[in-house]
Image (spheres, rainbow, N blue to C red):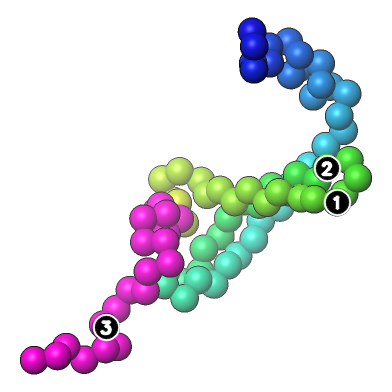
Amino acid sequence: MSGQVSSTAVERFWRRVLVGCYTNRKRILHPQVGVISLHCRTLVDPDQAQSLLVFTATPGTEDHDKLRLLSVIGSQRLGASTTAASG
């Protein structure tokens, strides 16, 4: 298995490594879609030198729809263009 790690090796490694995990809810006011209420899971490495924030929404909710919309529009701005069309 050159270049691959077996799932057994990953499982052994994961059991040895203590990763802190904290979960709470966040309300975010986004300029394009308004208020979004999200679950926030924070994973912290053993040295607490790095952390990873994972935001999710409950499927079937308005918050989930807003989060999906943001995944499509990205950093685009919704609304009228601020530049005049040249004629």
Check residue 49 in the rendering and tell me which mark sits there, or answer none: 1
**In the image, which residues are magenta?**
65-87
Q: Label 2: which residue? A: 45
- Quadrant for residue 45, please give it: top right
13 relative position to 31: left or right? right
Q: Which callout, 3 or 1, points at the residue further toward the start of the chain?
A: 1
Pointers 1 and 2 in contact (C-beta within 8 Å): yes
The residues bearing labels 3 and 2 have C-alpha atoms spaced at a distance of 44 Å
**Residue type for callout 1:** Ala
Q: Point out the residue furthest to the front here.
A: 2
Question: Which residue is pictured at 56% across the width and 60% down the height?
Answer: 37
**Residue type for callout 3:** Ser
Residue 7 percent location from the top left of the image: 68, 13
62 relative position to 40: left or right? left
Q: Is residue 66 visible?
A: no
Q: Nearer the viewer, residue 2 or 57?
A: 2
Q: Nearer the viewer, residue 23 or 80?
A: 80
Question: Which residue is pictured at 64% across the width and 16% down the height?
Answer: 4
Q: Nearer the viewer, residue 70 or 75?
A: 75
Residue 24 percent location from the top left of the image: 71, 52
**7 to 43, vertically: above or below:** above
Please say whether residue 72 is one of the residues in the magenta stretch: yes
Q: Label 3: which residue? A: 81
- Quadrant for residue 83, please give it: bottom left
**Residue type for callout 2:** Asp
Q: Is residue 45 visible?
A: yes
Q: Say which element carries label 1.
A: loop
